[in-house]
């Protein structure tokens, strides 16, 4: 897999858990097919939506194998390997490789408030030494406690088998400079929903974002929309993405709202795994109200 293979809609799939905390494999397959039907070009296992913090290496590997068996070559399968310590990331890498993942998604060190330049570079040296699979960087300041700079991203691109980045920095100044400098050398995939359409016009190749699962416009149509002159449908879709993102990020503990929303549209997302609690009924009503406002059908 290379940078040209990373494009369009690459959702991070939810991991459906039963009330007892077991992975519901049939439900996972159903969700996987739903995302393909929405136009996914790749699907990410063990991302934030998938409650990666609650998945063991063995569970990740099983989900990758299930995804590969379900995909049958229709989409690429990505797996998240982010962890506070490198030994854990390496265990995830091994599970990904053993079960046929096509590409890995990795933050730098997570759950630290600051990381030095040598520590950042050393971590990716160790990741690269542990795998020949291509890497997609993941810059999520909210989850990392710091942000990669454009210079750091370029240094990682120069030194490692990096084919892209999931860019979840919420500063559009940053996105603008990243796209201007590196869009021709790596696949820049937008994270925040309200940046998806504007970023396409500036050179983004796609998006790994939460919210397009529910839009009235198919996610697979957003690349063409984002690179065309804005019209009424563009503005409507951008507003849907914005409102959905605000709503999903503003209710409960992640990903309780995402799972509740999927369940409302008939997709079997199950419940969050302990210690995250299912969304309160009053908050589920807020999702219904948002869907009503946007004209999204639900059960």
Image (spheres, rainbow, N blue to C red):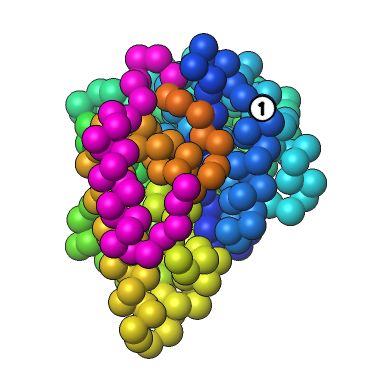
Whole-percent x, y for residue 108 in the image: 37, 32
Occupied quadrant, residue 68:
top right
Seen in the image, is 51 located left or right of residue 167?
Answer: right
Which one is nearer the viewer's eye here, 120 or 183?
Answer: 183
Q: Residues within 10 Å of mark 1 (few under 14, many from 20)?
A: some
| In the depicted structure, whether residue 9 falls above or below residue 109 | below
Seen in the image, is 267 located left or right of residue 64?
Answer: left
Seen in the image, is 96 located left or right of residue 265?
Answer: right
| In the depicted structure, whether residue 136 falls above or below residue 223 | above
Occupied quadrant, residue 248:
top left
Q: Residue at x 53, y 44 (%)?
A: 266
| In the depicted structure, whether residue 225 falls above or below residue 124 | below
Q: Residue at x 62, y 24 (%)?
A: 24
Seen in the image, is 265 located left or right of residue 145?
Answer: right
Which one is nearer the viewer's eye here, 118 or 140?
Answer: 140
Which residues are the magenta region? 273-299
Q: Residue at x 35, y 86 (%)?
A: 231
Whole-percent x, y for residue 22 in the image: 57, 16
What residue is disc 1 on?
25
Q: Is residue 155 visible?
A: no
């Amino acid at each position: 897999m290379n940078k040209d293979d990373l494009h369009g809609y690459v959702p991070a799939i939810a991991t459906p858990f039963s009330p007892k905390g077991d992975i519901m494999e049939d439900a996972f397959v159903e969700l996987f097919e739903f995302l393909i039907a929405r136009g996914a070009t790749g699907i990410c296992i063990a991302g934030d939506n998938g409650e990666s913090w609650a998945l063991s290496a063995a569970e990740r590997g099983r989900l990758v194998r299930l995804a590969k068996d379900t995909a049958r070559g229709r989409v690429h399968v990505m797996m998240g390997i982010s962890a506070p310590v490198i030994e854990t990331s390496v265990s995830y890498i091994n599970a990904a490789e053993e079960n046929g993942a096509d590409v890995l998604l990795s933050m730098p060190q997570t759950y630290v408030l600051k990381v030095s330049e040598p520590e950042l570079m050393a971590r990716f040296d160790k990741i690269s030494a542990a795998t020949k699979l291509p890497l997609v960087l993941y810059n999520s300041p909210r989850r990392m406690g710091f942000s990669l700079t454009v210079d750091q991203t370029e240094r990682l691109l120069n030194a490692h088998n990096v084919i892209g980045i999931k860019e979840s920095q919420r500063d559009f100044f940053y996105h603008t400079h990243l796209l201007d400098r590196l869009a021709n050398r790596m696949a820049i995939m937008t994270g925040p929903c309200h940046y998806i359409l504007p970023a396409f016009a500036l050179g983004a190749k796609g998006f790994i974002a939460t919210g397009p699962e529910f839009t009235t416009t198919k996610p697979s149509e957003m690349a063409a929309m984002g690179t065309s002159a804005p019209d009424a449908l563009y503005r409507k879709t951008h507003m849907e993405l914005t409102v959905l993102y605000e709503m999903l990020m503003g209710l409960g503990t992640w990903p309780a709202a995402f799972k509740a929303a999927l369940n409302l549209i008939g997709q079997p997302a199950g419940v969050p795994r302990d210690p995250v609690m299912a969304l309160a009924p009053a908050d589920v009503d807020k999702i219904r109200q948002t869907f009503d406002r946007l004209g999204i059908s639900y059960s």
